[in-house]
Each structure stands twice: as C-alpha cells, then as structure tokens.
Image: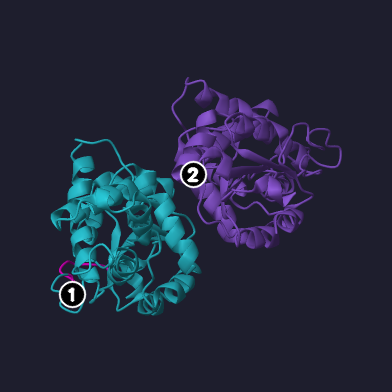
Chain colours: A purple, B cyan
Amino acid sequence: MGARLESVEALVFDMFGTVVDWRESVAAEVATHLSEYLPTVDPREFADLWRAEYQPSMEQVRTGSRPFTRLNVLHRENLETVLGRLGTDPKSIPARTLDEVNLSWHRLDPWPDAVSGLTRLKEQFIIAPLSNANVRLALDVAKRAHLPWDAILGAEVAGAYKPEAAAYLRTVEILGLEPPQVAMVAAHNSDLAAAQQVGLRTVFVPRLTEHGPAQTIDLSPDGDWDVVAEDFEDLADQVA
Amino acid sequence: MGARLESVEALVFDMFGTVVDWRESVAAEVATHLSEYLPTVDPREFADLWRAEYQPSMEQVRTGSRPFTRLNVLHRENLETVLGRLGTDPKSIPARTLDEVNLSWHRLDPWPDAVSGLTRLKEQFIIAPLSNANVRLALDVAKRAHLPWDAILGAEVAGAYKPEAAAYLRTVEILGLEPPQVAMVAAHNSDLAAAQQVGLRTVFVPRLTEHGPAQTIDLSPDGDWDVVAEDFEDLADQVA
C-alpha cells in the first residue's frame, strides 16, 4: 500500500472531523457557556446546527458574492444565526459570552491517534493542515493539542475555500511541489474527490463518529483513493 | 525587563542572521558544490556577494516593478548574477548543480541557542518566523533544524517583503492580534525600526558574527527597543 504514495513529499490534512473531534469539543463548551441561556437545547444538537451553517457561509465567498472572510468571522456570524433559529435573540446573551463560545473552535480535541500518528508521519513527510480554518484557529488548536505541524496552510493562506481547486493548487505551489507529490488526507469523500480532480493523491481515514453514533455519511470510501487507513497510526504503518 | 513585553501574545522572528547563521551554512555548501568551478573564490566571500544581491532583488518587488516573487526564485537569479560578476558563465555549470547550491538556503544551521531558546519561549508565546523567506524555505530550515514554530508566517503569506509596513501588519492581522500584542525579534536594527513604526513591540538580539569576525553593523541596539537580549536563552530568562 505504501507504494501508492511513492514520490509523495507532503501530506496535507483536513482538520475538522479528520484530525479533531469538533462535535464533542464544541458541545462541551456550549454546555458550559450557553446552558444558562438555552436550558432546553441539547449541546450536541446545537453543535450540529452550528456546523450546518458552515458550508452555506463559505459558499458566499466561493461564489464571489463576498470577499474572502476568515472562518472565525463566519463562525461568529453563524452562531448568531443558530441562536435566532432557536428563538433566542443573540443580543440577550453578553457579546463576551458569545465570543468565548466562538473560541470553542480554537479548543478542539484531537482524535486519540492524531498526535502519535502525525508525529510518526512527520519523520517521513512534510505535514500541514489544508483546512478551511483560518491560521489563528488552526494554530490555537495545534498549540493546545500539540499537533506537530511543519506549517499551517489552508484556506486563509491560499485565499480560497475548499473544495475550490485554488485551495488545493495554491497550497501545492506554496509547498514548491507538483500535485502528485502531495496527498490530501481526509475523512470526507467529497474533499478527496476535489483534491483528486486537480491531481493530488488521496488518503481516506474514516471517522465513524464525527457526527455522533448515528452517523450515516463517509462511513466508507466511495472513490478510488490511493490509500485507505483506519486511523493515523494505521496510515503511518502503511507508509513505513 | 519582562514587563516591557506585557500583553504580548506572539513573538515573530527575523530568520536570516537572527535564528540561523546563513553565512557559514551557505559558504560550506558553496565549498562543496562550486569549488570545482570557482577554485580561486573564497566560499565566505561568495556567500557575502550572494547575500549582497538580496535587498536589491526584493526592491524590485517592493517598488512594484515586479509582482510578488518567492525568495527562492530571487536567490536562484541572484546566484547567476554573482557568478557573472565573478567572470563565470552560469551556463558553464550544470543547472542541477546550481539548483542544489540554491537549496543551501533551505539547509541553514541555527545559532546554538536557537532551538533551546525557542522551545522555552513557545511555552509562553505564539512563535513564528516573520522572515522574507518563502514558506517552503522556512519550512525546510525548521524541519531540518527542529525549530519548533507554531506557524510559518512572513513575506509570502503577507504578500509583501519587509520592511514594508504590510509585511508586519498583515502578519499581525493573520495572528488575530493588534500590533502591540506582537513583538518582532531581530538582530537587525532596521527591521526593528520598521516594526516599531507600525506599532509592534521590539526585541533586539545581536548576532555579532553574522557577517563574520570583522562585522561592523548591528553590533549594538541603536533604537529604543523594548527588550535587548544576548541570545534566545537570555530572552527566555528575561520574560520568564
């Protein structure tokens, strides 16, 4: 299986869901900071609703109806949108509290295999996030969780949100490489399809509980990915 | 002295000369790869001549007469310029050899205190290079030397070369901070002057042999810098 990553010099990683468990991490912070204002709302359901606004908010940037806007700004706007949907006026909650809740995306916990797997993979490859997270968000997550990235790349540095081709291709160019020398690692088939479309190699690492125990999507590979690994430790085993 | 960095959350570092000893590192590679073609040229003198083209080549970008061009491209052009000045036709040397010599800038050795000092400073601050190096160059230097950066920032990510104000201010913005929350660490008074001009804090760390034993510039602070430290270990002591 290692042969399928021959000539690959860099592994770039989706972050939300692939490296970190956003749902449980955000839910825990929502429970801490918002339960007083939303006593009847399940924190995991709130995390799901918040995450559901993620793609639509980036779509405004992708279509050009809005200039490139950092994800932490979109997250903050989406937080108010979700509160409104739940019938809570965002202005009824202190702005400072909402800012703190927004920072929950900067304090996401990694999956158990992430740090040890990345540490092994770093010996053999350049490793970097290619996430839609802005630099400071990804940096804060990495610093807190000790993710050993060689650089923080992704949408903000590329100036484009995945799955736009430019997000992948500008990252490849910044790395001084050609697309086949870079492998995208993701728990999401759609991310890999977009990366493969522009010539990158692909590694699928399913995260079966990203969306909770009743998850129905991305349970298995649905494309011809170069490598399928159970987790980052398994990936390090396969490429060793 | 630590009080002068109060409210500072990130330390951003000049790289060439401040973190790494470019002169001895480049000279060693020039001796290895070019002595056959330039038997009478002193490798350190060659390194000095090459470095002397650094500012003029970036000036074309700063003045807008050339679009933003990565430093490794400028280095490669400057290499040919220097060879021509020395009376050697660059075409008389295999392009592969010149490419290899150009990569000497990706294999610079850190000053002895750099890794240990940065490792200590990382516990208290976000640390990142704010260098004119392109991302891949800075990444390669860091990976080889084990520099524990939290992110690779600088001219390429900011889209502007120091000492342009945008190089500092866009980096501050990417970090999600205000200028007084970021301190520029450099061995060059001119870099600190430009950073201070746009509101950053400043840390001077003299590197007395950056230009060899006969160095005449940047031997001492010539501005009102917030901190002056002997090296990165001393800086870590002062801010502890």
Work out whether residue B22 can be spotted: yes
**Quadrant assignment for the N terminus of chain B:** bottom left
Question: Toward the viewer: A107 or B92?
Answer: B92
Residue identifier under label 1? B220
Between residue B102 and residue A195, name the one nearer to us: B102
- Would residue B31 be counted in the magenta stretch? no
What secondary structure characterizes most of the magenta part?
loop
Badge 2 amino acid? Leu
Which residue matches tag 2? A177
Residue at screen point 36% across, 45% down: B156
**B50 or B230: nearer the viewer:** B50
Q: Residue at x 61, y 34 (%)?
A: A195
Picture quadrant of residue A58: top right
Say which amino acid is labelled 1.
Ser
Badge 1 local density, few (<14 within 10 Å), some, or many (20+)? some
The magenta segment: B218-226
SS label for mark 1: loop
| Outermost right residue | A214
Pointers 2 and 1 within a single chain: no
Secondary structure under the numbered disc 2 in the rendered image: loop
Res. A98 visible in picture: no
Binning the other alpha carbons within 10 Å of mark 2 as few (below 14), some (14 to 19) or many (20 upward) gives some
Q: Is residue B224 magenta?
A: yes
